[in-house]
Amino acid sequence: MAITGVLRPGHVRLRVLDLDEGVRHYRDVLGLQEMGRDDQGRVYFKAWDERDHNSLVLREADEAGMDAMAFKVSDKATLDKLEADIQAFGLSTERIPAGEMLETGERVIFQAPTGHFFELYAEKTDVGNGMPYVNPEVWVQDQKGINPVRYDHCLLYGPNIDQVEKLFTEVLGFYTTENVLMEDGNSNLAVFMSCSNKAHDIAFVMHPEPGKLHHLSFLLDSWEGVLKAADIMSMNRVSIDIGPTRHGITRGTTIYAFDPSGNRFETFAGGYQTYPDNHRITWTFDQVGPAIFYHDRQLNERFLSVVS
């Protein structure tokens, strides 16, 4: 498919309780590359195969969680158009000037009906992936830790997910790949949406508290990479939530764990490719267990209730 408009997830701005612990976790255990620090005390990271300067930004705060998730758009004209469309949808926007984040252009920020803040931007410095653009090798040697390919998606908890689905599909150009129904068989418990041909770039679960982060996810190359991630987490005494296992939704393989501040993160591999003309996949409430954890076909309470 031709990807236009919103291109992909660009970065997530995350709050941690102890910045030094957070840096050690995401740099040394997860294996992201530290790219810089700004005069606000924020620390910037990228995964090895990402070309743009940053995809994760940490700041120290009294409460863990997500400040905002950002998407990169194709150009400045698209940024202007989407801002106008968001305003026409009934949401207010704010322009954040270029340079407020390191190596990042002007951003448009808005609050979705679920209470989460989202950003759109068109420009970020291309720093490459450690290999030349002419005659490269196939991967960079001597990488640290789990070493994900890229930041992949977020799953977010909040109210009004039908409204947020409308915002993302009718305004931002996403399409729904999968949904999970409530017990009534009509309303949605969860929606999974894509702006590309990935199984999902963003997902929402109905939750009474607004603005909550369930997890941020990093892509690995293979199921073997997920198993190695579990080994590295255990070696470093990372608190593992569940896995390694497999999802019914998206068909991806996964392990979930917590950073030192209690933010849940996922290392994820696989998942199917999809297109906007594909029929969405629907899961009924009685099959939520295998939808989320296909192997043991049941949920654990912590996975459902612990958010940041």
Image: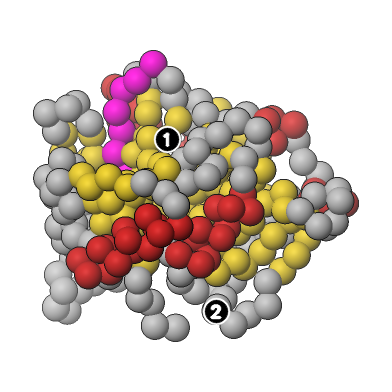
Amino acid type, callout 2:
Tyr
Q: Residue at x 66, y 43 (%)?
A: 206
Front-most of 141 and 217?
217
Q: Secondary structure at mark 1?
A: strand
Residue topped by disc 1: 66
- Asked whether the viewer can see residue 87, the reply is yes
Q: Is residue 2 left or right of residue 34?
A: right
Q: Is residue 302 left or right of residue 101?
A: right
Q: Is residue 193 left or right of residue 79?
A: right
Q: Residue at x 60, y 66 (%)?
A: 176
> Relative to residue 133, is residue 86 depicted above or below?
above
- Within 10 Å of disc 2 (Cα), the crowding (few <14, some 14-19, many 20+) is some
Q: Are marks 2 and 1 in contact (CB under 8 Å)?
A: no
* Residue 249 among magenta residues: no
Front-most of 85 and 154?
85
Q: Is residue 144 left or right of residue 132?
A: right
Q: Residue at x 75, y 65 (%)?
A: 282
Residue topped by disc 2: 275
